[in-house]
Image (cartoon, rainbow, N blue to C red):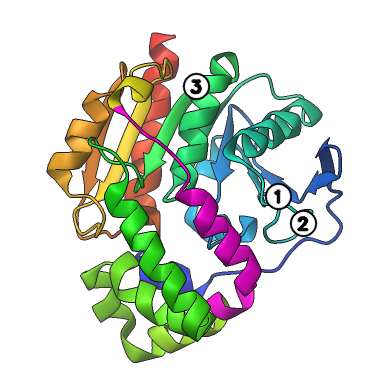
Amino acid sequence: MPGYENLSRLDLTYREDTPRIRTREGVELYYETRGEGTAIVLLNPLFLPAPSWRVFTEELEQQFRLIGFDLCNHGASSHVAEEPTWEEHATDVIGLLDALEVESAYLIGASTSTILARDLALRYPDRVRGVVLAGPVFGPQGMRRQRQVQKAWLRTLENHGITALYEHMYPEVFSAAMNEALGAPGFLGFREAFSALSTVEDLTNGMKRAMQDDNSPELLARVAAPTLVVIGDDDFLMGPTAAKELAEQFPKGRCEIMAKAGHVPYVDDAETFQALVRKFIDEVESNA
């Protein structure tokens, strides 16, 4: 189904009957679980909540157990005084898996949450069966470009608010094909939803945290889990050549390029993205 049709079905409502799970002192996470089988943990970008995954993972739900949740300090999960570190976010994920009695899982990270996916694979190799990095924010040479982008977004947010941030981000994050397909009605409709997703404080703290990372080829060389890098060929942050170079830095890495997709490729083409994930997991499981 084309991305613009999925966006028209986007359901961001929370299931209030779902109990929160306590992962550490003072922190309870909102979570959703759908389907049965091998577990896949869906790691949110900082700008999107757990419910946003539903319309983009309907086919995966037929074969796997999907676990989505809101990061601490975002969405419907606990908000604490200090923005959690990536290490604390990783601890929360493991606490969530423990509570759900999941011994190991695949991870799907998108945009900023690719940092968390990488760190989980490094810190908890026995709990991570494989990693999918969709639109990574770290490149083969480092994260300087990502920090420059985040700083520009932060200045827009701090000086002009959430609506202006959306207008700044939209033509960068969405592919040219998606932008043309949605037109003005889609741009305006999604702006309303985006403005309701987060507070200025949550977005500010999250973007500042995303800049606090020191990626390097040496770090990626220690990731033991099979790793799939997926980018759109219209990703504003990283081109196909850099994505392939990044995948080569993982001991068991490979890369897939999605045509006419942007920085969050599953939004542009959920069917192709899910097919790539299924193929990746099937190959890893067959070689286990």
- Residue 174: image tag: none
N-terminal label among 1 and 2 = 1
Q: CA distance from mark 3 to mark 2?
A: 26 Å
For the C terminus, give its image quadrant.
Answer: top left
Please say whether residue 211 is one of the residues in the magenta stretch: yes
Q: Is residue 198 visible?
A: no
In the displayed structure, does residue 241 sit left or right of residue 190?
A: left
Magenta stretch holds residue 155? no
* Sooner in the amino-acid sequence: mark 3 or mark 2: 2
Q: Which residue bears the numbered disc 1?
A: 72
Boundaries of the magenta span: 194-216
Q: What amino acid type should be assigned to the residue bearing mark 3?
A: Leu
Taking the image as shown, residue 103 lies to the left or right of residue 159, namely right
Q: Secondary structure at mark 3?
A: helix
Distance, label 1 to label 2, CA atoms, is: 6 Å
User: Hey, what amino acid is under mark 2?
Assistant: His
Q: In the picture, residue 37 is in which quadrant? A: top right
Q: Residue at the far left: name it.
A: 241
Crowd tier of the residue under label 1, counting other residues whose Cα lies within 10 Å: few below 14, some 14–19, many 20 or above? many
Q: Which residue is mark 2?
A: 79
Which amino acid type is marked by label 1? Cys
Q: Callout 1: helix, strand or loop?
A: loop
Q: Which mark is residue 122?
A: 3
- Residue 248 visible in the displayed image: yes
The percent coordinates of residue 264 (x first, y second) are 37, 56
